[in-house]
Image (cartoon, helix red, strand yellow):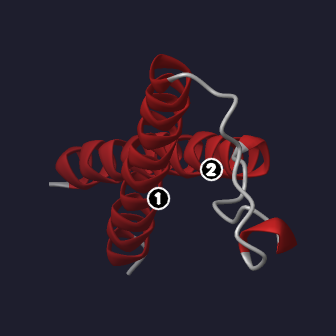
Amino acid sequence: MLAFLLDTATVVLTIRIILMALMLISAVYVVVVVMQQEDNSEGLGALAGQSNENESFYGKNKAKNKEHRQKLWTIVASCVMAVSSIVFFILAK
C-alpha cells in the first residue's frame, strides 16, 4: 500500500514539475510576443484622413498575415498557461 502511495506521489510531483515548466515557457513566450507586436492604430494622422498609400496590396496583406499569426499564437500560449495553472493548482491539493 505504501509503495502505491509513493508511486502516486512521485507521478503527481512529476506532473506538477512539467506543468510549472509549461507555465514558465508559455508566460515568457506571451511576454516576448506581445512586446514584438505592433499597435493597430495609425496614429494621429488617421484623424486627419491621412493614410499610407505607398504600400502595395501584397505588402499590406503580408504584414496582416504575420500580425494575425502572432495574435493567434499569443492566444494559444495564453490558453495553455491558463489551463496548465488550473491543473497545477488542482493537483496541489
Residue type at the position of mark 1: Ser
Measured in 3D between alpha carbons, the distance from the residue under mark 2 to the one under mark 1, in whole angstroms, is 7 Å
Classify mark 1: residues with Cα within 10 Å, few (<14), some (14-19) or many (20+).
Answer: some
Q: Residue at x 25, y 55 (%)?
A: 5
- Is 27 left, or right, of 12 in this rendering? right
- Per the rendering, the mark at residue 78 is 1
Q: Residue at x 69, y 53 (%)?
A: 51
- Disc 2 target residue: 30
Residue type at the position of mark 2: Val
Q: Residue furthest right?
A: 44
Q: Is residue 23 above or below residue 10?
A: below
From the viewer's side, name the closer residue of 51 and 40. 51
Q: Is residue 7 above or below residue 61?
A: below
Classify mark 2: residues with Cα within 10 Å, few (<14), some (14-19) or many (20+).
Answer: many
* Marks 2,1: beta carbons within 8 A: yes
Q: Split into 4 quadrants, where in the image is the N terminus? A: bottom left
- Is 73 left, or right, of 52 in this rendering? left
x and y percentages locating residue 84 in the rendered image:
39, 58
